Amino acid sequence: MKIAIGADHRGFSLKEVLKEFLKEKGYEVIDFGTHSEESFDYPDAAIPAGEAVASGEADRGILICMTGIGMSIAANKVKGVRAALVTGIEFAELSRRHNDANVICLQGGYVDPEDAKKFVEVFLTTEFEGGRHEKRVNKIKEYESTH
């Protein structure tokens, strides 16, 4: 599985931890930056990473900024992206099972790296449940295709 990952300067250190974690688990990682703690605008990582997920270049995405909010907003502007701000294991699971989220957004300034690893692992290993939830996701896809 290919994972697009990106962060701004406030998410850089957590991105680096998660990159190593993903590689150890056997995932292929595509890094969309930033590559340091120098000031970096979150849309500059969120949009290209989101485009990689939407196009199929990457299977899923992980985005990190201070609060996760900016990354969520920017990534969700990309047609085909369903980015979820995740703050707990249950949310990681439900974002996949119920919403078929394909990008997880994390709080680089607030989440412990060990917790973040757990959130990511659940996000990457949980399948979409479909059923009644598929109808809802399809409404989003329909809107995107007509607007």
Image (tube, rainbow, N blue to C red):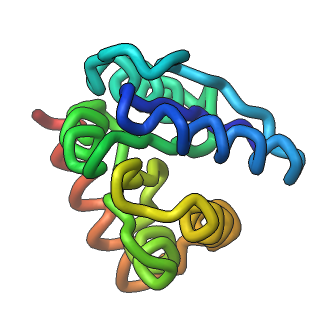
Q: Residue at x 16, y 47 (%)?
A: 143
Q: Residue at x 70, y 68 (%)?
A: 125
Q: Residue at x 69, y 39 (%)?
A: 19
Relative to 60, 40 lies left or right: left
Q: Residue furthest front?
A: 37
In which quarter of the view is residue 46 placed?
top left
The number of discs equals: 0
Q: Quadrant of the N terminus?
A: top right
Is residue 119 left or right of 21 when viewed as pictured?
A: left
Q: Can you say whether 22 is above or below 2 in the image?
A: below
Q: Nearer the viewer, residue 76 or 39?
A: 39
Where's residue 30, x and y in %?
Answer: 66, 25
From this view, report whether residue 104 is shown above or below residue 32: below
Left or right: 82 in relation to 14: left
30 to 118, vertically: above or below: above
Q: Residue 54 location, x and y as percent?
A: 46, 33
Pinpoint residue 2: horizontal percent, then vertical percent: 72, 37
Quarter of image, res 45: top left
Residue name at image x 40 percent, y 54 percent: 106
Question: In the rendered view of the protein, which quadrant contains the C terminus?
Answer: top left
User: Compared with residue 47, is residue 143 higher up or lower down, i.e. above or below?
Assistant: below
